[in-house]
């Protein structure tokens, strides 16, 4: 694990240099093919197809109830815990369909990490929270290795300096923003390839939000990050690609600068200019 | 008198009656506690805990065998009641809607309502008859059977209070369902579960009827599980229904100890619950 | 998926134990009372002679005593318990709510044997004094006939009432909590007095309240120690409050270890079996009522914890 030096994200008025950095994409990381999702008889996602590229930040935006949270949760099969849900179509992560029968969901979730809207640290110490994933996946062979990995994760999540002297204290004693960064550290500890973030900053104050955004922008060097957000400015600030959802359908998916300056669909333009949502 | 005045009058009388009801209920409580303390404190001394009972009629002596007996019986009961109760509670909360969970919940509530004397008869049938003698083990079984449904239901209710996001957080890190339940959800509910166990213990420590023909009684000091054993509650019963004043006084003292124990458990339970609420925020 | 199945079966096995336990109790009780059932059949419950020496076992006095004492307890305790429930949940200032709830919980937590102790040395003498002072005119009535001994049906009814009050009131309180505030608000908006608004709420909650009262009844039916220490333990069927009588639980407690011969033991067990069935029916019915009432708006607070503390 490399340490991440923090860099401020560029402002939305991009220069051509930034543009080329943002369009550098590699092979497809996640290939979603005609995904339909049902809660019982109700269809929540309709025929979604898109490609997620590696080592960039992809944002999902759209009004409440448009399905963006449901969709992100299909990528690590988190919707499996809800009874009565059904999936049609394919989700290929590096050419393997994660909805194929016999797929080990536990292994999937090691590779595809998740950070939730409301931070959910375990009622354990700060150290134990980050160590949890390492312990259950048996990723550290000795106590010193465990401590080392915990430190790395906390550094990656830009939380280390604030908690290094109180690792044994309860995680619940941290502030909201710190708890969320702790949850990010916890997710990063198990070295996922892909990090899913479901509105990670929506419950935080502006300063804490800013720190999370910085973090997200910097994480893409090591991870493929997908972030759901209802805040368009946030999407414009941190993401390279943006997908706009509406009523369970994927309306438009393109590079962020294009979506926010010259969208192809009228619906997208209406949403971005605030005509609804 | 106008209709309105009469209505207001009735309302005032009603409110007063409810207040009176509270006082009426508190009166026996006060009486019992006052008597308990007055009578019990007189005979409460270290002898009660360190000495063995004297033969009938002779003054003095203590109830050491009885107190130790109660400890042993409640310990035995917890030994099997806590695992069975907690794990049943886990099942009922994890697989909430299934037919088995509904049936088990019904069984737990039913068991809760079975008179303790009937449980005594059952324990007699399975643990005394086959061996042809009373034993501490049989008493422990009877008390344990009473403990199981209490622990099971409180565990279930408390596990349901743990927020779902905690489970999702664990699953998202690659935990299996079993792992998520035992390493995150149960620990999160642990203070409450422990409280439930403590309250259940307080309840069974005060039980007499199921012990009358299972652990029976023993005038001598014994820790042998296959022999009958004395217990605080049975001893109080025997002393209270005897003809000796000294034994009556000892009965009050032992009753005071019992009630203090229950009191402390209730307070502790409330304290823990309040503290957990504050932590949760 | 296989992992999950292992987990489910492993935990499920413990849960199933509970089911097996309840069934086993029923089976074992029946098995242990077969001799008596075969010997006496239904006569058992219609004969009032209980003469172990002669081998005659008639259990009518015990059913009578159990029902009489429990109904008496119910009559005395219900208005008080409901008054407390209403007071704590609707009328008292918020500051008092915690301490009052705690006090009722304390009352519920006192062990039966301690109530019995108090009953022998405090209540029974007080009842005797009360009985001795009944005017001659009333003495003629069957309800107050016989020598005023203190130990008897009245003492039993009173002690049961005291024990049942906290139980019924805490369950009733939980039931009242599930009444939507809109019910009371609607009443107040129409100009109702406090009494009328509360009456509306109680009417809404009537099924649950009946359930709470029935749960208390079930508790009284099975109560053993406190009753046996004050009821006089005399197997007779008598209408008099003063007369010493006997209950099903009390006779089992007193005579089980003295029982000579299998028939005697089986007769007592048969009494236990019927007690089991009666309490099962009463408790199930009352829980059904409470559940039916709480269906539209389930509150999270565990009703069971209140009962467990009782």
Image (cartoon, coloured by chain):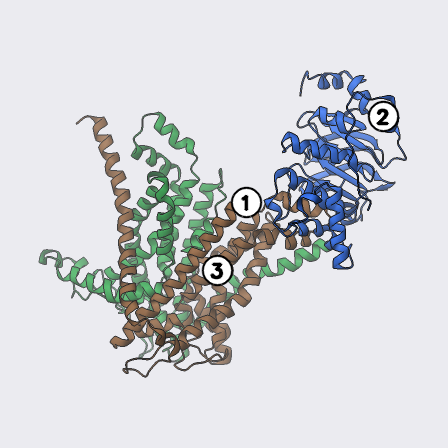
Chain colours: A blue, B brown, C green
Give the residue number, with chain letter if any, for mark 3. B198
Give the residue number, with chain letter if any, for mark 2. A18
Give the number of the mark in front: 1 or 2.
2
Q: Where's residue A126, x and y in %?
A: 65, 49
Which chain is home to disc 1?
B
Marks 2/3 in contact by CB < 8 Å: the verdict is: no
Separation (CA) of disc 2 from disc 3: 64 Å
Give the number of the mark in front: 2 or 3.
2
Above/below status of B89 relative to B227 = above
Query: Are callouts 3 and 1 both on one chain?
Result: yes
Above/below status of B174 relative to A235 = below
Q: Where's residue C106, x and y in %?
A: 37, 55
Who is closer to the viewer here, B208 or A174?
A: A174
Which chain is home to disc 2?
A
Who is closer to the viewer here, C239 or C309?
A: C309
Give the residue number, with chain letter if any, for mark 1. B280
């Amino acid at each position: 694990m490399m340490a991440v030096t923090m860099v401020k994200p560029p402002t939305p008025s991009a220069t051509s240099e930034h543009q080329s950095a943002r369009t550098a994409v590699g092979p497809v990381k996640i290939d979603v093919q005609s995904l339909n999702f049902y809660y019982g008889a109700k269809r929540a996602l309709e025929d979604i197809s898109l490609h997620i590229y590696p080592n960039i930040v992809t944002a999902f935006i759209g009004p409440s109830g448009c399905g963006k949270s449901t969709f992100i949760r299909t990528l690590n099969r988190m919707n499996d815990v809800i009874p009565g849900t059904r999936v049609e179509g394919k989700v290929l992560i590096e050419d393997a369909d994660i909805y194929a029968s016999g797929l080990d969901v536990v292994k999937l979730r090691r590779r595809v990490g998740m950070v939730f809207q409301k931070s959910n640290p375990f009622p354990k110490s700060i150290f134990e929270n980050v160590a949890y994933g390492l312990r259950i996946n048996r990723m550290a062979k000795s106590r010193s290795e465990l401590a080392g990995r915990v430190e790395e994760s906390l550094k990656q999540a830009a939380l280390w300096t604030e908690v290094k002297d109180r690792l044994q204290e309860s995680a619940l004693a941290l502030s909201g923003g710190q708890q969320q960064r702790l949850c990010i550290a916890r997710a990063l500890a198990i070295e996922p390839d892909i990090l899913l973030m479901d509105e990670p900053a929506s419950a935080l104050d502006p300063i804490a939000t800013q720190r999370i955004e910085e973090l997200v922008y910097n994480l893409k060097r090591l991870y493929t990050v997908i972030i759901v957000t209802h805040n368009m400015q946030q999407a414009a600030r941190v993401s390279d690609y943006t997908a706009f959802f509406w009523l369970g359908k994927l309306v438009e998916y393109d590079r962020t600068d294009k979506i926010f300056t010259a969208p192809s669909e009228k619906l997208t333009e209406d949403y971005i200019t605030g005509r609804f949502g | 008198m106008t209709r309105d005045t009469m209505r207001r009058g009735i309302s005032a009388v009603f409110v007063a009656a409810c207040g009176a009801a509270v006082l009426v209920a508190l009166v026996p409580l006060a009486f019992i506690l006052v008597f308990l303390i007055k009578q019990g404190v007189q005979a409460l001394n270290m002898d009660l805990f360190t000495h063995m009972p004297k033969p009938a009629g002779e003054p003095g002596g203590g109830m050491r065998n009885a107190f130790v007996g109660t400890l042993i019986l409640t310990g035995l009961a917890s030994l099997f009641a806590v695992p069975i109760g907690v794990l049943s509670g886990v099942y009922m909360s994890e697989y909430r809607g299934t037919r088995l969970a509904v049936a088990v919940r019904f069984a737990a509530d039913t068991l809760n309502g079975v008179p303790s004397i009937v449980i005594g008869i059952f324990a007699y049938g399975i643990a005394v008859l086959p061996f042809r003698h009373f034993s501490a083990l049989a008493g422990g079984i009877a008390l344990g059977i009473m403990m199981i449904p209490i622990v099971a239901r409180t565990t279930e209710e408390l596990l349901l209070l743990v927020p779902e996001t905690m489970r999702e957080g664990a699953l998202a890190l690659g935990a299996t369902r079993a792992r998520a339940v035992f390493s995150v959800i149960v620990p999160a509910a642990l203070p409450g579960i422990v409280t439930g166990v403590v309250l259940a213990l307080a309840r069974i420590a005060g039980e007499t009827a199921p012990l009358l023909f299972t652990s029976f009684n023993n005038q001598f000091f014994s820790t042998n599980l296959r022999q009958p054993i004395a217990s605080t509650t049975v001893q109080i019963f025997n002393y209270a229904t005897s003809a000796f004043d000294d034994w009556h006084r000892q009965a009050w003292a032992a009753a005071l100890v019992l009630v203090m124990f229950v009191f402390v458990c209730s307070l502790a339970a409330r304290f823990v619950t309040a503290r957990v609420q504050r932590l949760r925020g | 998926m296989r992992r999950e199945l292992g987990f489910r079966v492993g935990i499920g096995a413990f849960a199933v134990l509970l089911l097996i336990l309840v069934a086993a109790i029923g089976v074992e009780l029946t098995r242990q009372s077969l001799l008596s059932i075969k010997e006496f059949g239904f006569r058992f419950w219609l004969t009032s002679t209980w003469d172990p020496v002669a081998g005659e076992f008639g259990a009518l006095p015990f059913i009578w005593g159990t029902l009489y004492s429990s109904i008496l307890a119910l009559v005395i305790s219900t208005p008080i318990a409901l008054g407390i429930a209403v007071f704590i949940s609707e009328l008292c200032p918020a500051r008092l709510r915690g301490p009052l709830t705690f006090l009722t919980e304390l009352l519920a937590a006192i062990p039966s044997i301690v109530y019995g102790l108090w009953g022998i040395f405090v209540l029974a003498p007080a009842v005797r004094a009360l009985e001795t002072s009944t005017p001659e005119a009333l003495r003629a009535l069957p309800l107050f006939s016989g020598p005023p001994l203190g130990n008897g049906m009245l003492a039993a009814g009173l002690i049961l009432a005291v024990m049942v009050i906290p139980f019924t009131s805490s369950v009733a309180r939980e039931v009242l909590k599930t009444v939507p505030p809109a019910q009371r608000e609607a009443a107040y908006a129409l100009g109702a007095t406090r009494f009328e608004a509360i009456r509306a709420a109680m009417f809404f909650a009537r099924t649950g309240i009946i359930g709470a009262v029935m749960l208390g009844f079930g508790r009284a039916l099975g109560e053993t120690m406190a009753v046996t220490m004050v009821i006089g333990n005399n197997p007779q069927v008598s209408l008099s409050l003063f007369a010493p009588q006997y209950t099903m639980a009390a006779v089992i407690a007193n005579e089980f270890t003295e029982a000579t011969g299998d028939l005697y033991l089986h007769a007592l067990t048969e009494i236990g079996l019927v007690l089991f069935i009666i309490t099962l029916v009463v408790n199930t019915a009352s829980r059904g009522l409470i559940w039916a009432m709480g269906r539209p708006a389930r509150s999270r607070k565990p009703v069971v914890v209140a009962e467990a503390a009782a």
